[in-house]
Amino acid sequence: MLTHKINTGFLLAVIFLLAVFSIFNPLPWWLFGLPILLWFTIAALGSAFVQSGYHIKTLNKNLKTPGRQIAITFDDGPTPETPKVLALLKKYNTKATFFCIGQQIEKHPDIFKTIIEEGHTVGNHTFTHSPKMGFFSVQKVMDEVTFTDRIIKNYGLKPLLFRPPYGVTHPNLSKVLKQTCHYVIGWNIRSLDTVIKQEQKIFMRIKKRLAPGSIILLHDTSQKTINVLEQLLILLQQEKYNAVTVNELLNIPAYEE
Ligand SMILES: [Zn+2]
């Protein structure tokens, strides 16, 4: 696996070799720019795609899962839309995982409580979900993670599952998560439900990629997603899939004992 350490080590080695070579044989300056550009491109792609495991190990699927299990995950709640998601999950007798934003839990404590009471798993999705988190200090990222853990602890659970906002990872986040020992949960089916406008397109995107062991990313933030969810739950029933919590799919604990 190509990690940030390997990429950076490789860059430094190439720059060193070029520098040594240039003592004997002057090289054009742009030749030094090429490996830097390559390093930057790899680092940007590795940070943007959660499945890459570039900064930190992530769990994105479980192809060895017994039977036809899959996991549906919802990010960015709780919101006023969440109860409709919960009602659908109940109607189809399905369990799911909710990666919640600390600030949102403070806004909707009753909805958050209901998620837990109905047997779904909750995980940490930072306190503010700031798009600028890649530029936060280690301490500030640490606060984002620990504040949210503390809020969830008020409900009697110490979460072990964490999902990075936007699926973006960066060196400071990986430093923090290595200390806090969370499991970093990604996905292998990104519905793009916050980007694509047409419900049918979102549904087809998921349907095409569906396979046992998959982790699906949705957001409990819009009616559009709720409509897609009902179609998805019907499809799962027809195709004899069993939707479980992400911790059950991955066979890991969701909370500290
Ligand atoms: Zn999110």
Image: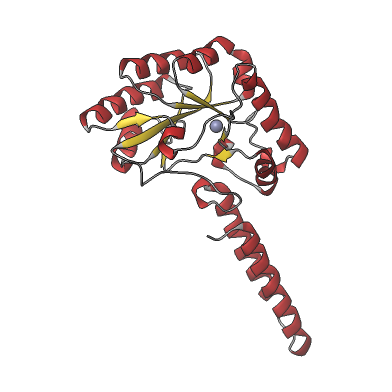
Q: Looking at this view, is 68 or 78 the one in front?
A: 68
- Coordinates of residue 93 in the picture (x, y in percent): 32, 19
Q: Looking at this view, is 23 or 74 the one in front?
A: 74
Instruction: Point out the quarter of the image occupied by ligand 1.
Output: top right
Q: Looking at this view, is 95 or 88 the one in front?
A: 95
Q: Residue furthest front?
A: 257
Q: Looking at this view, is 123 or 100 the one in front?
A: 123
Q: Residue furthest bottom?
A: 24
Answer with the quarter of the image where residue 69 lies.
top left
Q: Is residue 12 left or right of residue 86?
A: right
Q: Is residue 5 left or right of residue 98?
A: right
- Coordinates of residue 99 in the picture (x, y in percent): 53, 28
Quadrant of the image containing the C terminus:
top right
Q: Is residue 66 left or right of residue 134?
A: left
Rendered view: 229 above or below 31: above
Q: Is residue 19 left or right of residue 8?
A: right
Is the image coloured rainbow, by chain, by secondary structure, or in one colour? secondary structure
- Coordinates of residue 28 in the picture (x, y in percent): 70, 79
Whether residue 115 is visible: yes
- Coordinates of residue 80 in the picture (x, y in percent): 50, 13
Q: Residue furthest top?
A: 110
Rendered view: 221 above or below 186: above
Q: How many marks?
A: 0
Which residue is depicted at the point 54% across and 13% down?
Answer: 113
Whether residue 137 is visible: no
Which residue is depicted at the point 33% across and 34% down?
Answer: 201
Which residue is depicted at the point 63% across and 23% down?
Answer: 102
